[in-house]
Image (cartoon, rainbow, N blue to C red):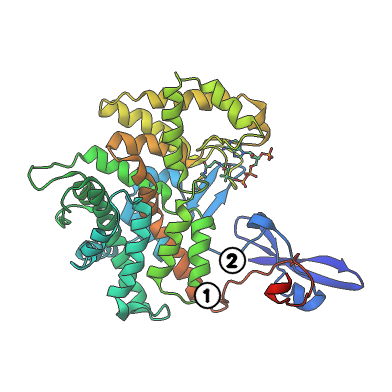
Amino acid sequence: MSSSCAKLEIDDTKIELPILTGSEGERGLDISHLRERCGVITYDPGYVNTGSCQSAITYVDGDQGILRYRGIPIEQLAERSNFLETAYLLIYGKLPTQEEYDAFVRVITRHTMLHEDVKRFYDGFPRDAHPMAILSAVIGALSTFYQDSHDPTNPEQVEISIHRLIAKIPTIAAYSYKKSIGQPFVYPDNALEYCSNFLRMMFSVPAEPYEVDPRIAKVLHLLFILHADHEQNCSTSTVRLVGSSHANLFASVAAGVYALWGPRHGGANQQVIEMLERIRADRGNVRKYIELAKDRSHPFRLFGFGHRVYKHYDPRARILKQACDDILAQIGIHDPLVEIAKQIEEIALQDDFFLSRKLYPNVDFYSGILYKAIGFPVNMFTVLFAIGRLPGWIAHWREMLADPHLKIGRPRQIYIGPLCTDYTDITTR
Ligand code: CMC
């Protein structure tokens, strides 16, 4: 990281602000001593221009549509890696050797079961509870079962929490689905690899044999890899912020799940399918919805379009669009929603409204179509995003805790409320 300086003059004070330059040339003004030296703070709603940390995990170039985990292009990982290997890469900073990989898979596999008492939580949730609410609640509740591993400064405790979380999240997710449809929970089968095990827990019933389709398991690996990290997005920043108080990993990740749930973040994948269904029910009138999205007086947005960082085609959406074509053809599914999605893309990408605002399909635009083809119900889509994003959350939480300069996250504000006023008695108000 090289540095130079910027000069700032405020009233009569002149100061120099160091400029930090990242390994890919991104420059940032270091304002960490700004207030102390000139009594001002910065104002940046939505943190559009604010770098909250230095990170060596993921590189995104939104103008060119580039995404790399630990320097490796997402396209290569999508084609050649699998989810647990990618998780290892993100968390530990390098691709594992065969021995490291085998040991990692072994330990994750060993922790797939939930404590029997966790199952009772599910009895208490309403049957129609959103599985994201259940996911976060149960992840938070894991901290009550593993009170021996709360210390974020103890490497062994952190390590076992990482293993427990990655291992148990598919089980927690599958149980929430089973609860919602009134079927018995299916215990993990540790003879199966990660995604196959998850598919079996989701879709098998004790009364019948179930065989995992390896093509489907492969697509799930692809989807999880593509979602595994995306640097300082809303949920990852949430995990970092919560973790900066030295809250344990379960608590920090539970908070991240809630942040992901929102329709402007991970919840968009559910909204995309609901939007496509709505358009189909409206006789496929795509243009009507494009016009609605352009109408500034109407709240409707084209879900799966636009991104804070990508001002170019999201590379993950490009991979998923191709996967949609390939996989749906392979498993013999013809989904009219694919045609509607493609029409939307075609029309929007010729329309000045979208072009001038650089709004392109994002990762959520095609992921839902694939989840639907696999057989996942719509309200599980964001849960799938969470399973995929977990290694990224963990990697960032771990990186942050290892930083010797870690400070609790605590933004400032510009107060615009009333000036000092006297308290008045209730009878005189
Ligand atoms: N449809 C219609 N107009 C849009 C859309 C959209 N999907 N996205 C942005 N715009 C317009 C927006 O109204 C604004 O117009 P104007 O300048 O006239 O006010 C302009 O484009 C810039 O939008 P913004 O909301 O200021 O941009 P942002 O960077 O704050 O928001 C976003 C990014 C992802 C929240 C937004 O593009 C959006 O709401 N998209 C739809 C939801 C979605 O697909 N979310 C998933 C994001 S990718 C995966 C993830 O992070 O979870």
Q: Residue at x 56, y 75 (%)?
A: 408
Depth check, front residue: 246 or 415: 415
Question: Is the N terminus in the top left, top right, bottom left or bottom right quadrant?
Answer: bottom right
Q: Position of residue 74 (x, y in %)?
A: 45, 46
Q: Quadrant of residue 328?
A: top left
Specify whether 382 is left or right of 213. right
Which disc, if any, is residue 38? Answer: none
| Helix, strand or loop for disc 2 | loop
Residue found at the far front of this picture: 427
Give the amino acid at mark 1.
Asp
Kindly identify which residue carries mark 1: 403
**Quick check: 295 above or below 129?**
above
Count neighbours of disc 2 (C-alpha within 10 A) and say few if under 14, some if 14 to 19, many if 20 or more: few
Specify whether 55 is left or right of 42. left
Which disc, if any, is residue 53? Answer: 2
Confirm or deny contact between disc 1 and disc 2 (CB under 8 A).
yes
How far apart are the alpha carbons under marks 1 and 2? Answer: 10 Å
Answer yes or no: is residue 182 visible: yes
Report ligand 1 position as a quadrant. Answer: top right
**Quick check: 403 above or below 185?**
below
Give the amino acid at mark 2.
Cys
Residue found at the far right of this picture: 12
Q: Residue at x 39, y 49 (%)?
A: 385
**Quick check: 301 above or below 13?**
above
